[in-house]
Image: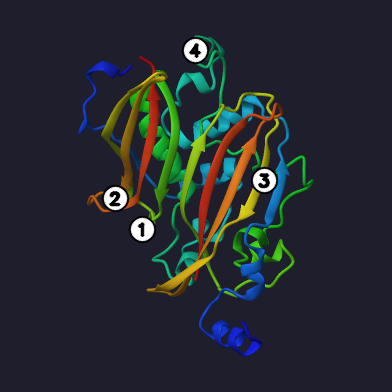
Amino acid sequence: MTSQQAEKDNERTAISLAMRQAVGSELSRMVSYPVSESDIRKWAAAVYYPDEPPARFWDHEAAGDSRAGGITAPEEFNPFAWMKAEPKGVKPTSAATDADSTERSLGIEGPHLMNQLNGGVSVEYGVPIRPGDVITSVTRLGEYTERPGSLGLMLFTPLETTWTNQQGEVVKRSRLVLIRY
Amino acid sequence: MIDAASLKVGDELPRFDRKTGFAIWNRYAAVNDEYVPIHMDDAAGQAAGLPGAIGMGNLQFSYLHNVVRDWMGDAGRIVSMSCQFRAPNLRDQVVSACGRVTGLETTSDGLAVTLEVWTQDEDGNRLAPGTCEVLLDT
């Protein structure tokens, strides 16, 4: 592609050459702190509020009698909230609101769109998360697509993530589509 | 506990209903560290072109798991879940998570059940349609 052609494409696309070349790159690698029973209880209470969550998520006796044989986390539980063992520290608040944060994490310029939303998610589950588990998450950048929408140009960015536990077992494989406009 | 042997295509799952708003969203933000302005502040939602503050897509994803877990009990496990966030969950909406059996297949590991799942508002408008696969013990 000539630089003239690339410039022309950039006039009608949010996807730069650098962004295209970054597809498949590792966006993030995170390691959780050991999951606690309290983390699991709080998650279950929040997603079932104001009802009591199923006892297998918080009661040892009920969980022991369940098919899992002990307390497990709800499938969609997030062990990376607030702080992670790696990378250390609290995530910057700008990460959730900066619509260029995906590309910025790769050291390239983002599409300079103003807003971002979660467009959808698909998950395949493996083994459940149990108290004491340490989860590693690796996210890669999927193929960009875009199309006009009611709020202007919509850029779709798939984020493909695999979680494994401390034994190397797959906890889940997920694909989240970030919509930016 | 559901009876896997009596299931048939077309069966509907008991709905999971929640009146949504800041009280519910803030609880979820607290466990998912999701203090994003569009979920906290009407002005931030409006600045993003929305009618006001909106609920978290991740919370609707939890509701889809809840409706399946409440139906299935401890009789099996969720193998996969997917949804698209098609319309925002606005403040004071009653969001219902729903499901319907669309496929049944006996496998060596159990009964594989395919479900159509979705969340909807009070008028039946679908907010987050999706699919789910579960494997029931037989």
> Which residue is under mark 4?
A62
For the residues tagged 2 and 3, is the chain the same?
no
For the residues tagged 3 and 4, is the chain the same?
yes
Give the spatial CA distance, label 2 vs label 1.
10 Å
> Does B66 sit left or right of A80 as displayed?
left
> Does A9 sit left or right of A50 as displayed?
right
Q: Are marks 2 and 3 in contact (CB under 8 Å)?
A: no
* In this view, the mark in front (3 or 4): 3
Q: Farthest residue toward the right?
A: A88
Q: Position of residue B78 (x, y in %)?
A: 44, 30
* In this view, the mark in front (2 or 1): 1
Going from the N terminus, do you reach mark 2 or mark 1 first? 1
Q: Are marks 2 and 1 in contact (CB under 8 Å)?
A: yes
Q: Position of residue B85 (x, y in %)?
A: 40, 54
Q: Chain of mark 3?
A: A
> Which residue is under mark 1?
B87
**Which quadrant of the figure contains the C terminus of chain B?**
top left
* Residue B96 seen in the figure: no
Q: Quadrant of residue B31?
A: top right
> Which residue is under mark 2?
B121
Of residues A112 and A3, the one nearer the viewer is: A3
Give the spatial CA distance, label 2 vs label 4.
34 Å
Badge 1 marks a residue whose secondary structure is loop
**Which quadrant of the figure contains the N terminus of chain B?**
top left
Badge 2 marks a residue whose secondary structure is loop
> Which residue is under mark 3?
A138
Badge 4 marks a residue whose secondary structure is helix
Identify the residue at image location x=56%, y=88%.
A8
